[in-house]
Image: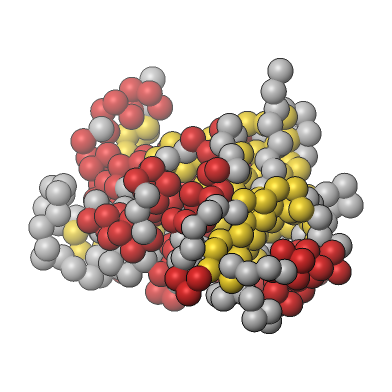
């Protein structure tokens, strides 16, 4: 196989950047044997050129001057791994203007400014590849763009944040409080010192915006996505849900109905214990996709970390160098916002089952009050749990599972329940998500 040398410029020499440099410098021979491409790291740009890294670069490669990359016409691929949005956006625009294809793992940037960057890439005759932006080493982007291109995607359910999945797995398996599980995640390196973006659902929403745009062929805005995080989740609710046969996960959900209306949401979700996603533990990611022809397909693997993410970045570099990314990018046709926005379904119209926990005074007539409010809002009960024993202030937990009900009705019922003097704390409500399974 004839060798083709591909020079690469890397912007951002942090954790993932080091992983990318390590793969390119240490595995160049095996990559060449498989692809016929000789990857060469020609320039690495970072504001910090002094801190030791776990990978050694050839002399003269590391610089704090991005112009050395931009002005080098022998470098055709620029890899942006600085994170954030403002500086990263300008870096990508400069790379495109300099005639370089872009590879990125920056989900926040693509979720917020992807449409603008895609337009700039097309105007420059370049492409943007972004496999690593959504699920680390899991090839979900290429799966949606090419592997499932013969299908009309009807739904996808994803565990796309390893931090939250590790926390919920710990709370479920070891009966830990949220704060304990978070501290353990930080100790093991699965959570940042400031985990806000993860635990509030923001990171999952960024990834859903990117995946949904590809799956549903539409320009998606972050405002289209309903977002609710896990910071208020209690181990008691995980336990009560478990008694009903459910496991709690933070899901990123995209659904399209027969009228092409699109529902996008990120929130804690009780799913059946025997569902495949329920068994995805720790920091792993998984996305279950439903297509019109293929049925159900599930993508599973490590969703973060130096080498899994670097694996996806280098795969994109190879795809760009082979010319594949330019073709798929050129044929990435998304319905414009003017057509997409009217199709976005509001969360109030969601039909779902719900888990509701009420801390009530242990006295006669409480169930009658609860039943009356639920009936007034046309909410039917499918199951109920009340254990013997009293909690603080002579209260007991009452756990209710509903039949499928519109979100707006549940919201109204919760507001009425919260006003009862027999309800001693704010009602807890978690959606029960019935994920279909494609079984023989």
At x 47% / y 38%, what residue is drawn? Answer: 280
Q: Position of residue 35 (x, y in %)?
A: 40, 27
Q: Position of residue 332 (x, y in %)?
A: 67, 49
Q: Residue furthest right?
A: 259
Q: Quadrant of residue 84?
A: bottom left
At x 43% / y 62%, what residue is drawn? Answer: 198
Q: Can the viewer see residue 162 in this picture?
A: no
Q: Position of residue 341 (x, y in %)?
A: 78, 68
Q: Is residue 34 above or below residue 323?
A: above
Q: Can the viewer see residue 384 in this picture?
A: yes
At x 48% / y 74%, what residue is drawn? Answer: 393
The mark tally for this picture is: 0
Residue placed most toward the observer, 348 or 389:
389
Which quadrant, please, contains the C terminus? top right
Which quadrant, please, contains the N terminus? top left
Q: How is the image coloured?
A: secondary structure
Q: Quadrant of residue 39?
A: top left
Q: Position of residue 263 (x, y in %)?
A: 74, 57
Residue placed most toward the observer, 309 or 5:
309
At x 67% / y 55%, what residue is drawn? Answer: 400
Residue placed most toward the observer, 72 or 132:
132
Report whether 94 appears left or right of 46: right
Q: Quadrant of residue 70?
A: bottom left
């Amino acid at each position: 196989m004839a060798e083709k040398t591909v020079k690469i410029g890397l912007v951002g020499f942090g954790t993932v950047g080091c992983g990318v440099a390590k793969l390119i410098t240490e595995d160049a021979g095996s990559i060449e044997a498989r692809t016929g491409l000789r990857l060469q790291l020609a320039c690495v740009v970072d504001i910090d050129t002094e801190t030791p890294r776990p990978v050694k670069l050839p002399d003269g490669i590391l610089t704090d001057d991005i112009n050395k990359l931009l002005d080098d016409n022998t470098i055709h691929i620029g890899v942006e791994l600085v994170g954030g949005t403002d500086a990263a956006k300008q870096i990508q625009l400069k790379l495109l203007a300099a005639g370089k294809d872009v590879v990125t793992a920056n989900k926040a940037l693509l979720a917020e400014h992807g449409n603008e960057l895609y337009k700039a890439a097309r105007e420059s005759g370049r492409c943007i590849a972004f496999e690593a932006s959504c699920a680390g080493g899991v090839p979900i982007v290429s799966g949606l763009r090419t592997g499932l291109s013969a299908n009309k995607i009807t739904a996808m359910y994803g565990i796309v944040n390893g931090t939250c999945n590790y926390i919920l797995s710990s709370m479920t398996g070891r009966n830990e409080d949220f704060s304990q599980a978070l501290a353990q995640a930080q100790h093991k390196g699965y959570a940042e010192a400031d985990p806000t973006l993860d635990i509030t659902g923001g990171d999952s929403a960024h990834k859903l915006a990117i995946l949904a745009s590809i799956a549903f062929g539409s320009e998606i805005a972050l405002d289209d996505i309903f977002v609710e995080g896990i910071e208020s989740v209690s181990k008691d609710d995980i336990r009560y849900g478990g008694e009903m046969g459910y496991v709690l996960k933070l899901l990123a959900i995209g659904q399209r109905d027969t009228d092409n209306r699109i529902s996008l949401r990120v929130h804690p979700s009780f799913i059946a214990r025997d569902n495949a996603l329920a068994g995805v533990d720790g920091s792993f990611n998984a996305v279950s996709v439903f297509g019109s022809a293929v049925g159900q397909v599930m993508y599973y693997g490590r969703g973060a970390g130096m080498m899994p993410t670097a694996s996806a970045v280098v795969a994109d570099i190879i795809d760009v160098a082979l010319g594949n990314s330019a073709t798929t990018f050129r044929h990435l046709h998304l319905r414009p916002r003017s057509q997409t926005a009217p199709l976005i379904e509001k969360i109030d119209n969601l039909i779902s089952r719900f888990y509701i926990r009420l801390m009530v005074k242990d006295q006669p007539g409480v169930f009658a009050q609860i039943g009356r409010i639920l009936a007034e809002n046309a909410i039917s009960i499918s199951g109920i749990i009340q254990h013997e024993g009293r909690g603080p202030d002579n209260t007991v937990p009452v756990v209710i599972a509903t039949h499928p009900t519109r979100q707006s009705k549940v919201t109204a019922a919760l507001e009425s329940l919260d006003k009862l003097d027999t309800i001693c704390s704010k009602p807890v409500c978690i959606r029960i998500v019935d994920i279909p399974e494609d079984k023989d």
